[in-house]
Image (cartoon, helix red, strand yellow):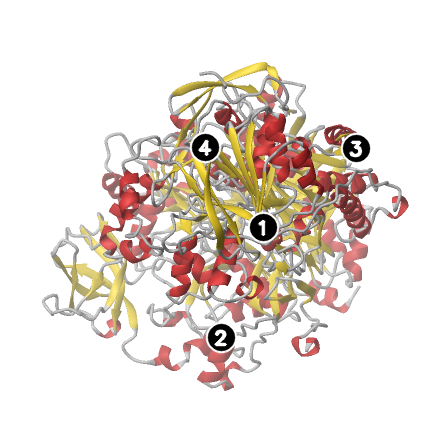
Amino acid sequence: MFSIYCPYCEEHREEEEFHAKGQAHIARPRDPESCSDKEWGEYLYFRDNPRGLHHELWVHAAGCRKFFNITRDTQNYEIKETYKIEAEPRITATQAQ
Amino acid sequence: MTQTNRLPSGGRLDRNRPVTFKYNGTTYSGFEGDTLASALLANGVDVVARSFKYSRPRGIVAAGADEPNAVLQLGATEATQVPNVRATQQELFDGLVAASTNGWPSTDNDLMSYIGKVGGRMMPPGFYYKTFMYPQSLWDTYEKFIRKAAGIGRSPTENDPDIYDHMNHHADVVVVGGGPAGLSAALAAGRAGAQVILADEQAEFGGMLLHSNELINDAPATEWVAAVVAELQTMDNVMLLPRSTVNGYHDHNFVTIHERRTDHLADLAPRGQVRQRMHRIRAGWVVLATGAIERPLVYANNDVPGCMLASAVSTYIKRYAVVPGNELVLMTTNDQGYTAAFDWQDAGRKVVAIVDTRAEPTGACVAQAQQRGLKVIKGSAVIEVKGSKRVSGVLVASIDAAGDRVTGNVQQLACDTVASAGGWSPAVHLACHTGSRPEWREDIQAFVPGKTVQRQLTAGAVHGSYTLRACLEEGIQQGMLAATNAGFGEQIAGQIPVPTVTETAAGPVMTLFHVPHTKPTSRAPKQFVDYQTDVTAAGIEVATREGYESIEHVKRYTAMGFGTDQGKLGNINGMAIAAKSLNKTIPETGTTIFRPNYTPITFGAIAGRHCKELYDPKRYTAMHRWHLAQGAKFEDVGQWKRPWYFPKPGESMQDSLNRECQAVRTSAGILDASTLGKIDIQGRDAREFLGRVYSNAWAKLAVGKCRYGLMCGEDGMVFDDGVTACLAENHFIMTTTTGGAAGVLEWLELYHQTEWPELEVYFNTVTDQWATMTISGPNSRKLLAELTDDIDLSGDSFKFMDWKEGTVAGVPARVFRISFTGELSFEVNVQANYGMYVWERVFEVGAKYNLTPYGTETMHILRAEKGFIIAGQDTDGSVTPIDLGMSWCVANNKPFSYIGKRGMAREDCLKENRKQLVGLKTRDPEVVIPEGAHAVENPNQAAPVPMLGHVTSSYYSACLGHSIAMGFIRGGHDRMGETVYYPQPDGSVIEAEICSPIFLDPKGERQNV
Amino acid sequence: MSEQMLAEQQTLIPVYALMDQLPETEGPRPESPLCHADLASLAEQGSREGGVRLQEQALLGHLVLRGSLQNESFVQGFAQVMGMALPGALESAAAGDASVRWISPDEWLLIVPGKQAFSLEKQLREVMAGHFSIANVSGGQTVLVLAGQDAVNVLKKSTGYDLRDRNFPVGKVVTTTFAKTQAVIRRTGQQEWELVVRRSFADYVWLWLQDASAEYGLTVTA
């Protein structure tokens, strides 16, 4: 069970308080109407599944109810950082290489 | 029976407290301080199990968690039955009742063993996979047979009367294992001021020191143990958990500990006491001091009762004052093994010989053996055991230096016990739980914990430091390091001296796993690797010969390590044999991975308090007590308990529903609608936000008005619906389905926080704030008028889809004129603390209108008569508003591309012949189509028959006098009047006509009066 | 007065719906979420020496305030009306009968005597401007006080939150899991905690607390 640092509560909490919401930084297209079916399909359904660092969206559901992002290593479940929703990750796979 | 194997003195027993217990129906005696295993051995019980596959008699081998055979069924009553208890870990108490779990019909005389004897060759590894997989239909039969024969034990058929619970902790340092290393670590971390939890699976702390002959600070080791434990007990920052197995080491230093609080006291926990507790600990640092498990050697017939681990022999003699036999042959690859022979001799029994596999052992122990007059046979091994239900002798032969083959003549020695000491395997199990692979250490020929991302330290034998001095030293070091890492400990660094220990010079160890035989492995008598799953050396060789090269595949093919002991004794031997057979090294072959739990755990401890009434929260409305008093039947909607219907005496369910429906259609009914989700939405951009998350238009909804909305996902599929009211220009209240409330709120927050943070809007749940009662029926206006003097209820003033504020029964209320029944309806919302009061006032005036409470089932029928959907029943995540025939609820001219718009425009959503929601009228008006039934065009068509869609809602409508249904039909909106067929499992076919889903009052005149 | 407030005052359409949800007279009988448990009678009958004491502080006024700390009128307005500042992350504050808990970076829970909820909401709305919200949830939740030498053990059975003194000093408040539901937990004393739970879950929490505290003895106080 993870111990997750909530960037809004500014302390670690038990995983039970959180919900995972999938890959982070999937922005809704600004003009959906101009998207082709393929582009819309990519936005809706296609997600990365990396072995290694992954940026994920989580919500502190049983706490402050804020959404935030986690950079997590999918191999050993280590959480490298958590950051607020408007922020960019400091740790990325390309850096790690 | 007398305790024939009990020594007259010694052991850590309370001889003033004799206890009696029953095993397989016979009464035996023992002492407090015994384990069930030590008491059985004291009483000369040799056979405790029959083996899984070959049904061979098996005896006690080990003295701890590694015991593979003495896995017993406990319990004096049906309700207190516990399967899968290792007798070596069960403390004896007066009145204990145990039974062996396999052996059919009895352990001593097992019919299966005849099958085993002749069937050995017929039951190669993979037997279960090869034979029992097919045919599938017979698996039930096979499973019953296998379970019974294999002795997996059984669960009780009555409810467990005991209490179990969970407790959460946070600790700076968790020390796992209370042996010399663990005690030292806890002491160091404790003195440093860190919050420490020390857990050990045994009743007493001390680990191997409890049976050791070694001295610490020139005194018996147990004195040091007592002093350390006493000091730890005085520390407020240290929590001691004896009888507590650290069963799981999970991500981010989360540790689960299974504490057995009363299992040593009685069959049933003393009244009010918790029997077992699961501690869930978030640890700053974990110090693994789990020690090592002795490896048995693999030799022919090494499973005959009387074959034991050398360390177990010492444990039984020194700790429990039990000598498990009379004449011992010890086989060892190392110096430490000699201790068992010395202890045996000191207990006054005969040591037949020490068989040392090393040609020239050099340790001090050899000289000591000679001084003691013991016969040491060097460069030799016990290659085979004689006897069936008890060892009667051994064959000893000289072997080559590599341990690959027998080199000399075979001699037979008579004995009744064979102890084997094959070296030690560090207990790396917990270190593996989080995915870390153990690493092979060539110098000690063992796997030790590997690299990990956990905040984990190791001390003592678990990472291969086998001497007492090293254990003590590392314990102090690692305990201190853990405390320092956790922010403590600088101040005491170096202040804890390592106790003095006298070291004896130890000679080199021989690497030997599999003892050679004069015959090839495949022809030699069975050489067991894994006792629990009956895996032999020959079996592993067969597996590699059949092409299984990965150790994980060998494991699955042979079942090695699949027992409830997870191969604690046999795995390393098995891997070594597989490696040798594959011409690889052990690290090249690798190891299988250990997973939680370290030892089996009861379901009770897993469930904790989350059972019975507390299994899941039950949510109640403010009027729940009234519903109970009226004898309502309840339906679970999410966690809510909603009245389903209100039966009157003698009524069938259908009678109740018919009565409730008629009351609403002819006079007045009332529904407790408090469970609907309610979200308070405030802010300048609230209206804009609604327009983005609903498929219909909200820009022009005026204050005082309500509107129904459909909520879709980005894929265009409906996922929730409800009515939202405009309370003020920047203030709305949204209702959601009962089950969808939390999900919708999270959905709104998701979009607000991640996509449109610039919109000024706040969402707050007010579901529990309002008690909601829907008064529905032609007399609802008259009824409500009697309860309010400040709301003008007239149709001109209070129109359909309006809301008004005023008082009802003297309580401030918001009243919404909305309808889910198609009748004139008023939904009264009052602050929930007044819900019951207002509800009761409504009934006081409602009597003359035959006000009838109705439940969810009647609500479903009434709305289905009107063709209103229920999100989640008539939708399943694959239907758009258009599919539902609700294009009136889609506003594609909104400037913002609302959620769902683009999804609905995908090619697949636009294609013709999608499944569309329609009404269904059965040809026979009395027949109700089962929900879920699939429609076909032609019931006589040969399979495969194309499915047209399924029925989503189906009821008998008393008001209409016939059944009604809604369901999906391909292209259904253009097929009105056509006939479809619903074949039933019994072969019958229900014929139905496609129609509008609005069965009643299509113009909506009833709700608009 | 800001332009926006002027604009809002000039229009006849109400911007926010403010509603006094309590009846004018004492006639209508309110029932707290744990009314059915009849804690008053239990307090009369039960043992007085349990390791855990439980009390429901029923029928208080609960207001959820939402706003940004960047919104000065929201921050100042609160201080002006309540006589205390909005507390920072995971902190609480109290002034007289009123206490306020940080819930989220833009959310606070204000608890006041039941009858003051409406007038305070009104006053707060009068002094606050810009983007904020106030929701009256007085009927939707209740306050339980858990105290005694074993209260911490009952909490350890109920939540995974770190309750140690150094992490959870008196005055701190957290929203976290509680058994299979949630609670806003505030430490109000060395051996005393306040739980705010939702109405519909109150019975579950009550059952849970009885069960979890059984081994220590539970005393209900009125």
Q: Nearer the viewer, residue B261 or B521?
A: B521
Q: Residues within 10 Å of mark 1 (few under 14, many from 20)?
A: many
Quadrant of image for the N terminus of chain B:
top left
Q: Percent from the top left, x then y, of residue B861?
A: 29, 51
Quadrant of image for the C terminus of chain B:
bottom left
- The image's mark for residue A44 is 2
* Quadrant of res B110: top left
Chain name for mark 3: B
Residue depicted at 16% across the width and 52% down the height: B927
* Quadrant of res B918: bottom left
The residue under label 1 is B429
- The image's mark for residue B625 is 4
Left or right placement of residue A24 versus residue B144 in this view:
right
The residue under label 3 is B235
Left or right placement of residue C74 versus residue B330 in this view:
right
For the residues marked 1 and 2, what is the alpha-carbon distance in whole angstroms? Answer: 42 Å
Chain name for mark 2: A
Instruction: Name the kind of residue labelled 4 in the image.
Output: Arg
| Mark found first going from the N terminus, 1 or 4 | 1
In the displayed structure, B658 sits above or below B938; it is above
Instruction: Name the kind of residue labelled 3 in the image.
Output: Met
Chain name for mark 4: B
| Mark found first going from the N terminus, 1 or 3 | 3
Q: Residues within 10 Å of mark 3 (few under 14, many from 20)?
A: some
For the residues marked 3 and 4, what is the alpha-carbon distance in whole angstroms? Answer: 50 Å
